[in-house]
Image (spheres, rainbow, N blue to C red):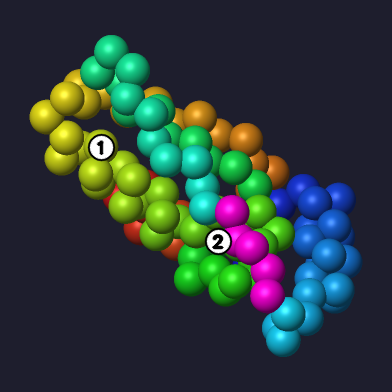
Amino acid sequence: MWAIRPDYHSALTEASAYFDEDEEYTIEPNRPPQEVDGVAIIHIHGALGKMLGPWEKMLGMTDYDEIWQQVSEAEASPNVTSILLHIDSPGGTITGLPELAA
């Protein structure tokens, strides 16, 4: 199930039609968290999902597990007193969201 803007879903579907698994693509990792004056800034961009494959990441999607990992690392850091989620996303799948929010 998706909770995403229809125009963005159409763009993802169209772009995925051109993906060829035999070719190599460079997958740009999410921006690493920044720490500024005790605040961990976690950048979240693109459509969101769980257990994303390489083509989804190539299209700029963000996996809920990556967000959870970055939040966990920020919580464990002795230098971090608060966490700011910088989100630029049209939405995404429901699967994985409740677990991330818990």
The mark total stands at 2
Q: Which image quarter: residue 13?
A: bottom right
Q: Earlier in the sequence, mark 1 or mark 2?
A: 2
Q: Which image quarter: residue 84?
A: top left
Return the x and y of residue 72 as percentages of the image width and height. 25, 46
Q: Main secondary structure of the magenta part?
A: loop
Return the x and y of residue 7 as percentages of the image width and height. 86, 51
**Is residue 27 located in the magenta-colored stretch of the structure?**
yes
Vertical comparison of 20 with 67: above or below: below
Residue at 48% from the left image edge and 71% from the top image edge = 51
Residue receiving disc 1: 74
Q: Is 36 positioned to the left or the right of 19 in the image? A: left
* Magenta stretch, residue numbers: 24-28
Residue 95 visible at all: no
Return the x and y of residue 93 as percentages of the image width and height. 59, 61
Q: Amino acid at mark 1?
A: Ala
Which residue appears farthest toward the bottom when viewing the image?
22
Name the foreground residue: 91 vs 24.
Answer: 24
Name the foreground residue: 84 vs 31.
Answer: 31
Mark 1 neighbour class, 10 Å CA radius: few under 14, some 14 to 19, many 20 or more: many
Residue at 41% from the left image edge and 55% from the top image edge = 66
Residue 83 visible at all: yes
Q: Is 8 positioned to the left or the right of 56 in the image? A: right
Return the x and y of residue 82 as percentages of the image width and height. 26, 23
Camera-near label (1 vs 2) is 1
Q: Amino acid at mark 2?
A: Gly
Which residue appears farthest toward the left when viewing the image?
78
Q: Which image quarter: residue 42?
A: top left
Vertical comparison of 85 with 30: above or below: above
Which mark is drawn over residue 49?
A: 2
Q: Dot 1 lies on which element? A: helix
Name the foreground residue: 31 vs 94.
Answer: 31
